[in-house]
Amino acid sequence: MEALIKDGQESALFVGGCVRNALLGIDVTDIDIATIYTPDIVKERLSAKGIRAVDTGIEHGTITAIKDNKTFEITTLRKDIKTDGRHAVVAFTDDWAVDAHRRDFTMNALFADINGQVFDPTGRGIDDLKKKRVVFVGDAHERIKEDLLRILRFFRFYGLYGAGEAEESALAACKENAHGIKNLSKERIGQEFFKILALNRAADILTLMFSCDVLKDMTQTYNKANMQLLVDRQRGFDCVDIYTRVLLLTDYNAEAGQDYMVFANKNKIHMKKIMKAHAFLKNMNAKEIRASVYWHGNAATLQAYLLKTLSSKDSLNPEVVDVARYWHAPEFPVTGEDLMAQGYVQGPELGGKLKAMECAWVENDFERLD
């Protein structure tokens, strides 16, 4: 801030989430700074202080400053010239109010100086934050049409910071424009939707979203009670897994989710393991759980067990959960070399015999076979 502030003028202010979270008394992770200076001047002033600067969003006026292994996003004040719901053409400005009125929600349009004095250009950001109201800056329809991703951001922010009934005008604007979400990139949709699924209030927020026609065709069988129970159990056992929530939401059809979002390969594999473990589990006793851990791993078995027991609140056994979480699967004690020493020849017959012995060993609860 000292690098950016000249002669005591308000040339740089903290903005957005860091101000919001500081006022709420919760952890600040990302620090964003707004400034009247253009990116070139920002880089010059940072360089003069020995601070490294990286062009991370230069077309939109954003420079990332790196100091003591921490990053700070510094963005020139902007105004929208043209928007199409996905991309925006911006121009730089030195007007703080203009910049504030192009932001999404009033609670995100707050600024603060280096001494902690807060500025509220919309005139209602602080009050909305105190009363836990998630309110679009200005007209909700206009803000959404500028960037359709704000529909999903509205539900995420309401899930994080909102209380009471959601603002009717915001819900109406979300519903009216919900059909346009499909025009966004799967990457952008996924980034927001995964954050919604991670919420403690995910079950309620999904219900509200679907009532507004937002991504409602992802599921035909959404069960709010089961989603809430899964969320509660994952939190209770400290094993929150949004991909298990995806499977429950899509009735175990991960392909449905891929119509809207992109899954990393490791997460696709993880979901497939959960589905295989889900199909494997029948009796759900400790012996069967150990077998599932051997074939599918601890994480997949645990999540599959939580899913299988959703139909009855009393059916979940904490001791079985501990087996799924902590039991370490042993290595199969027989190798192909052992069988070849007994006369088997390398080939399909040996492989089949080895697999049959392994299955019998697992079925025998990992007791040594003669």
Image (cartoon, rainbow, N blue to C red):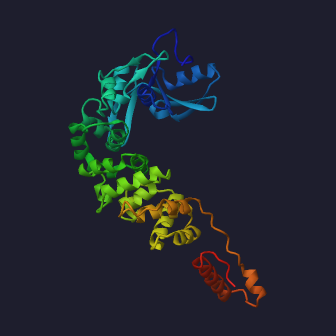
Residue 295 point in image, percent of width and height: 57, 71
Q: Quadrant of residue 140?
A: top left
Side (left or right) of 127 relative to 68 = left
Q: Quadrant of residue 159?
A: top left
**Which quadrant is the N terminus positioned in?**
top right
Residue 31 point in image, percent of width and height: 50, 29
Nearest the camera: 200 or 7? 200
Where 255 falls versus 181 (above or below)?
Answer: below
How many numbered discs?
A: 0
Residue 82 point in image, percent of width and height: 33, 35
Residue at the top extreme, as displayed? 7
Identity of the residue drawn at 24% across and 38% down: 165
Where 222 falls versus 82 (above or below)?
Answer: below
Answer yes or no: is residue 341 visible. yes
Side (left or right) of 12 relative to 183 = right
Residue 215 point in image, percent of width and height: 31, 53
Identity of the residue drawn at 36% across and 38% down: 157
Identity of the residue drawn at 40% across and 64% down: 315
Identity of the residue drawn at 73% across and 89% down: 345
Q: Quadrant of residue 361?
A: bottom right
